[in-house]
Amino acid sequence: MTQRSATSGAARETVFDVDTEKLARVYAQAGLGAAGENAGELVKELKSLVSDVLDKHPQLEQVFDSALVPQEEKLGMLDRLFAGQLSTTALNLLKVLAKHGRLGQLRYVVRSASALWELQNNRVQVQVQTASELSHELQHELREMLGKALGCEPLVTTEINPDLIGGFVVRMGDKVFDASTRTNLERTRQAMIARAIETIQNQPSHFIDQSGQG
């Protein structure tokens, strides 16, 4: 089980951006389908692309994500950088992303492809955010609990996010279970506001200014 700070890694990557994850899953499925029996190799190749290229050259990722760089220029850049370095399937996936203006979301696509591949092999990637660091005992209990609930081997990564105050947030692909104290407090606040609005609507006379009455 890997544990890290929620602020580490690429600053651009939003861990719980569910809408982006859903879209990335579509491209990931297409890429794995095109790879066929070589899907596992494609996943390794894409993960290496993130760790060896994007992580080491963040300015390249900024170019990939920039709307100011024309599509044709991005396609030419992909050929210059990766032709002969990546498999045809991997390079074609990058070009499809570029043609649809999604090259800047490559990290999400790679992460989704990895998760889909693991699921096919009866393993599932699970990301857990907690307000403070978990002990080894708690990490072990968490993994066992998730394994029983999912019926497969969970590959758990925990991240520390002090903003949660307490509790935890669990994400598997585009599914999120939020049991954080921050969210519970916000739900309580929203419920109080809703009750106040309902009271005003149902009993408006109680809120009439009577300052002029003796």
Image (tube, rainbow, N blue to C red):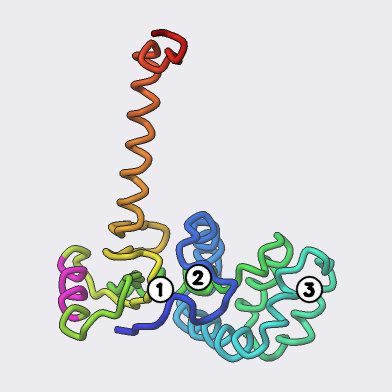
Tell me the amino acid under the disc marked 3: Leu
Do labels 1 and 2 touch, CB within 8 Å?
Answer: yes
Q: Residue 143 lies in magenta, yes or no?
A: yes
Residue pointed to by mark 1: 117
- Give the percent coordinates (x, y) of residue 198: 36, 23
From the viewer's perspective, tell me whether residue 195 is left or right of residue 55. Answer: left
| Quarter of the figure with the N terminus | bottom left
> How far, Cα to Cα, is label 3 from label 1?
27 Å
N-terminal label among 3 and 2:
2
Which element is circle 3 on?
A: helix
Give 89 or 96, whichever is nearer the viewer. Answer: 96
Residue pointed to by mark 3: 75
Give 59 or 123, whichever is nearer the viewer. Answer: 59
Residue pointed to by mark 2: 32
Q: Which residue lies furthest to the top in this view?
A: 213
| Quarter of the figure with the C terminus | top left
Q: Which residue lies furthest to the front in this view?
A: 214
N-terminal label among 1 and 2:
2
Q: Give the range drawn in magenta.
A: 140-148
Circle 1 Cα neighbour tier, 10 Å, few/some/many (<14 / 14–19 / ≥20): many
Relative to 101, say whether 132 is above or below.
below
Q: Viewer-nearest of labels 3 and 2?
A: 3
Circle 2 Cα neighbour tier, 10 Å, few/some/many (<14 / 14–19 / ≥20): many
* Residue shown at the point (36%, 71%) measured from the top left: 127
